Amino acid sequence: MQPIAQSSLRSVDGSGLKKDEEALIKGLKPISGLVASYNKRIREASEQGQDQSFKRLKQHLPSEWTTSIDIEHRKLEIVGLHLSTNRLSPGTTSQQTAISTIQCDNRIEPGNIAPAKSEIFQCQANNLEFITMASFGGYILDACFSPTGKTLLISGCDSLNDHSPVTCRQGADGNWSEKSRSKVEASEEILFQLNRLENTLLSITPEGHLNVSTLNSYDHWKKTRVLEPPPLEDGDEQVKARFSPLQDKIMSCNPLTGKINVLHVDGNSQWTLLNPLGDIRQVGLTAPEFNATNNYLITYNGTKVTIWGCDDQSNCLENKFEKNYDSSIEDCQMSDDEQHALIFPRGNQVFFLACDVDGHWSQVGEVRHSAQIVNHCNENVCNRICKAYLNNSGQYALTHDLAKKCIISGHDDNGAWVEKREIPSCDLVSFSISGRKVLARLGRGSFKIWGCHSGNRLDKGQPLEHIGSDRACFSPSENLLLSFGNLTNYACIWGDDEDGNLIEKARICHQRGINFARFNGQEDSVLSISRDCTVKVQWLDRDGKWQGQLMVQHQKRIDFADFSISGRLAFTVSMDGTACILGRDDNSEWTLQAITRHDGYVIQGALFNKLDNHFLTFGCSDKDHDKSGFVQFWSIGNDGKWAEKELITLAHPVEIAKFSPDSDHIMIHCQNNSGSATLPRGATALLWKIPASLSA
């Protein structure tokens, strides 16, 4: 790897540095004066005039300026200057071109231009196009692309009490620009959520202020504060808010007070608070359990449960169901289709509700577990239900108690809710992702699977025995299973025979225990990671048998390995500093296609893009994780071979590097961790464009 270059603000022979700096500073001073004068006048203009002026200004500013428009405070900011310099390496006579980035203070006040800082990155081949960056004096909490990849959301801070949310957007002309950067005095993270159309941005400050920003006709964010709850004290849990699945509502919950608010967007894109017929509060709600819904909202307060209906026409929340139970409510759940609900009071009972075709809610049944004394955490306690949840359709439910007994329940043919199966001595139980199957672990090496069929029919269940295994998972279609564990040296593939009986299809054997195994998306390949430092891929051959196998041997422990999204590629990363790319050849057999090693660096992450034609690895120095970092970019050529196209070395460790969803850009987040344990000394998010020539 090339060493990171020193400051580019120097003369070729190393002398005259002070004069160069003085000349640069003198050149910046009149610029800062012009910016200050412009900011003073722009505040006096109309909003339309401001937007038009900003738009014209951005078109005519020099290309080496990186600027930002602060919409909230109506001012222009200079956030960076990009200089290209020619250098002479010591002892040589030829020139080498290096692209350097000079960072300027990203919060420049009128009349004050901060001195240039040292460069933070260097490209080996300059095959990627640098677009922009956002820098912070402290650290970056999160940096992510929107679903379309046209917006980059960054949440960072300059101090423990100074957070700055930043959004960058790609315009219709393909150019990126910073659309908003606002300074917020806050001691915790600012939460973001973008709607699916990517024209509305929801943000929540640590103080609980709920803000909605919408894009105006000039492609700038216009912020409106829609809710301002009572002030929070230090240590209070932050307010939670989410868009509803249909995106036409926002629901928020204050964990401290239990207060829930529902806002609805009208035809003029204005967010209006739906007025409840009573105060909506939820006692005991925890952050992971809060989910926004479309039409019905279930809440509980002490022993009382209420279901609210959202009536957009009357601009009200209506009480659809209310009932008091004998003990305090621990949890409530609404099914995904919002037609079924589960009430979970403290004790050994769970109650089930259903909504009829006319929108009326009623209790349709209950499940009761045995009252007994059980040993739990070395104490004798009264048995109670500890977990209860519905499947996706709301037709079936699982309840699990401290005595390790599980009950599968659901509707009978008459619509009543009844107990369907009791599972004793059950360690773990869960629905499959679709909710059509139940998987229970009955002790190490013993599992049982039930099918939750339509027509309210639960099958008799099929056993699965794999000595030493403690984990099992379904394939994407849920027609196959994998079992594996640390105390068994093979992963087992299971499936049905012609008569529908569950049988062992194949084994993937290693020398030691299995840490991880999974199917690819096509279900024709299985990847397994073993404690013997090997990764194996086993696949179906042309005769439909699991006989093809590829083994990759590393020298040290496997950190991680996985398939690409498509399932046509895979990668491995090991503590020995190597990463491997695996893929299928013309005969559909898995082969080792590329291997990379970075001496002096630790690979901390790897990923393919969505199109499977690019690959990234990133990490930091193996001697000091608080120092330099790297990002390596690979592409596959027309000859089907992988080749390194770019190596970016950075002055600070790389926290994360990721592709945009459209595979056109790369975001790199690097962090200077040399500061205190609570506040690092700086962080930067950098955006790069992948040229079309590398994606052909």
Image: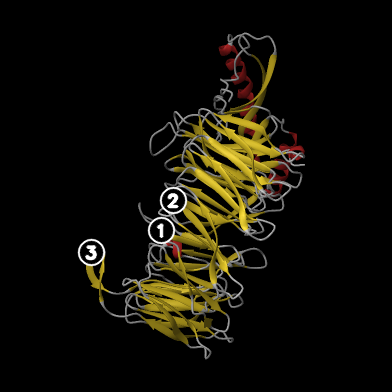
Q: Which amino acid does label 2 sit on?
A: Gly
User: Where in the figure is residue 9, as x and y percent of width and height?
Assistant: 60, 18
Helix or strand or loop: what does disc 2 sit on? loop
Furthest residue toward bottom: 414
* In this view, the mark in front (1 or 3): 1
Sequence-wise, the earlier of marks 1 and 3 is 3
Q: Where is residue 616 in the image (x, y as percent from the top left)?
A: 61, 40
Residue 243, position as x, y percentages in the image: 56, 63
Compared to 56, does 600 lie above or below? above
Write the residue at 47% across / 60% down: 240
Front tag of 2 and 3: 2
Earlier residue among tags 2 and 3: 3
Where residue 155 appears, as percent x and y from the top left, is 53, 46
The secondary element bearing badge 3 is classed as loop
- Disc 2 marks which residue? 513
Vertical placement of residue 292 versus 236, above or below: below
- The span from disc 2 to disc 3 (Cα, nearest Å) is 30 Å
Query: Label 1: which residue?
Result: 468
**Residue at the location (72% across, 31% down)?**
63
Of helix, strand and loop, which one carries label 1? loop
Instruction: Depth check: give the residue in front, 395 or 421.
Output: 421
Query: Which numbered circle lies on residue 377?
Result: none
